[in-house]
Amino acid sequence: MPPPSISKDLQTGLNPMSPQIARRVRETMETPRRKSTAGRIAGTPTRSFADRLHVHGRTPTRPSAGGASPSVAHTRSPRSYNATGLGHSPRSSVISGRNAENFIKQRLGVAAVSPSGGGKRGKAKERMYDRFVPSQDAIDRASSQFNIRDTTDRQKLKTLDPDTLAYQEQVAKACGVALDKRILAFNAEPPAAQRQDFRTSWSRPLRKPNSTVAARRVKSEPEKVLDAPGLSDDFYLNLIDWSANNMLAIALDNTVYLWNGNTGKTAPLCSVTREDTYVASLQWAPDGSHLAVGLSEGDIEIWSLESLKKMRTMRGRASRVGVLAWDTNVLSSGARDGSIWNHDVRLANHRVASLLSHESDVCGLKWRPDGQFLASGGNDNQVVIWDARSSLPKFTKAEHTAAVKALAWCPWQLNTLATGGGSHDRTVHFWNVSTTGKIASVDTGSQVTSILWSLEYKEFFTSHGFPNNHLSIWKYPSLTKIGDLEGHDARVLHTALSPDGQTVATGASDENLKFWKIWEAKKKGGKCGKSVGEKDVEDELVNAYRRMAIR
């Protein structure tokens, strides 16, 4: 017997339902309601379907001839919510027509199969339904409260001036509140896309360097050592030079000796017999046929290698000639009084130019291989660049804090000049003579006495005095040190590079002349060389440098 709270008409309307569904409906109607949004208190009896239908002005009707279900109204109770998995109590709604039955079935989590032919009822197939549940962790509560308040006060905000709205947007942005963000978040926010810097990606090398190729190693011991008694310990003198014919000249006391690099034999060339006169500088001609000897009294002697005789003496100075530099037929000499003279050895009146800029000893002098510029360094801590077509300096640099003796032009970058300072400076500067600007600098930690560039490697060699008295090999332009060589007991004041560009001769005040194998020759097709037939710009520059050096 159905409960008395359900009318006869309602029983007729629910007749097609199964006993299971009828039992659930009955339990739903008998369960007292909790407190609703309208203010009703839990425990108040729930009105029947018929009463609710009359309240809303609807009256249940009997099914029509076609078997259509009557219109019913259904209000879910807490029990029905637990059965369906819903979490809140909605307001009552009215379902009309034949959708009332399906509405009750779906909310109860059951879908009944309509009767099939022959009047037989098919099996009831149950389907459970679910809903989207917001993720509490993904909800931005500060943004939600701001957006809800913004929605309720929308009419008020419309009356605000643009400045106030702009200020609110700035405050929200500063506080991290997104004005256009959804209040409920059903899924966690996807990770933010990372911006890729294509400049870094495309600037990487296409291939990593081969780690199996070991770094170039330099022998720490000299290949040959010769005694050099009487080698002067004077920073401002230049007493060693190596010719293009593999002849090394060295001044010991008042005598100039020649060492043949091909045979290993040594022989004297000339001696100074005048009292209080000594050899102050040596320099081979570019082709190696003549040797210029500068004396302490100011004279310059030209000696022939073929005849081993003096060809001429160029006089006119009254000051010591401490440095010499050749450019084809022009010999430049730097004196203690700070003057530089250019001598044309073919002319009787040999002095063709006087270059005046230094205020003290000129101890460094180098022509660029193409003969366009002359670099000079002095005891006044200045570096001066001279144009061959003028007797006025092109520019002067005074960044060194000690005497500048070490000067060297880069063989593969003719506009690059390296200069090294004395014991109070200890720095090597690199200059661009085209822009007159400084390229880079490196602190060597010791007095710089000479600089030599490699003809095949992008490296340079430096010799040092106080306090370490060592030799160093550097990479260029990175200016990273490859290694140090420690073989002298006193400061290394004189150096010379062999004509093949592999060996460096060093002379120190410990009266030793040592030969160091600094750079190995590159083999074609090897690890260090290029394949046969490959056009290499660097090799072309090196060959041009060699051709200029032997003019």
Image (cartoon, helix red, strand yellow):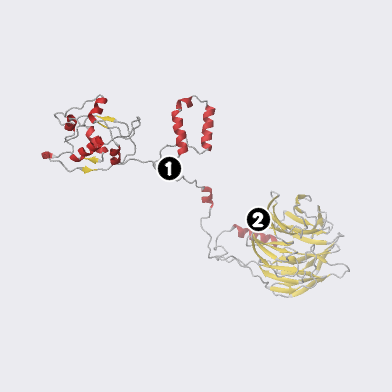
Q: Nearer the viewer, residue 451 or 356?
A: 451
Residue placed farthest to the right in the image?
A: 275
Residue 524, image quadrant: bottom right
Q: Residue at x 65, y 55 (%)?
A: 413
Residue placed farthest to the left in the image?
A: 118
Q: Residue at x 21, y 25 (%)?
A: 59
SS assignment at label 2: loop
SS assignment at label 1: helix
Image quarter (top left, top right, bottom left or bottom right) of the C terminus: bottom right
Residue 514, image quadrant: bottom right
Residue 9 shown left or right of residue 307 in the figure: left
Reading the image, the residue beneath label 2 is: 413
Q: CA distance from mark 1 to mark 2?
A: 63 Å
| CA neighbours of label 2 inside 10 A, class few (<14), some (14 to 19), many (20+) | few
Residue 335 shown left or right of residue 62 in the figure: right
Residue 26 shown left or right of residue 324 in the figure: left
> Of the residues shown, which amino acid type is indicated by label 2?
Gln
Residue 331 in view, yes or no? no
Q: Earlier in the sequence, mark 1 or mark 2?
A: 1
Q: Position of residue 472 (x, y in %)?
A: 68, 64
Q: Position of residue 333 (x, y in %)?
A: 80, 59
Q: Position of residue 426 (x, y in %)?
A: 73, 59
Residue 523, image quadrant: bottom right
Q: Nearer the viewer, residue 159 or 283?
A: 159
Q: Nearer the viewer, residue 167 or 64?
A: 64
Looking at the image, residue 6 lies above or below residue 534: above
Q: How many marks?
A: 2
Reading the image, the residue beneath label 1 is: 138
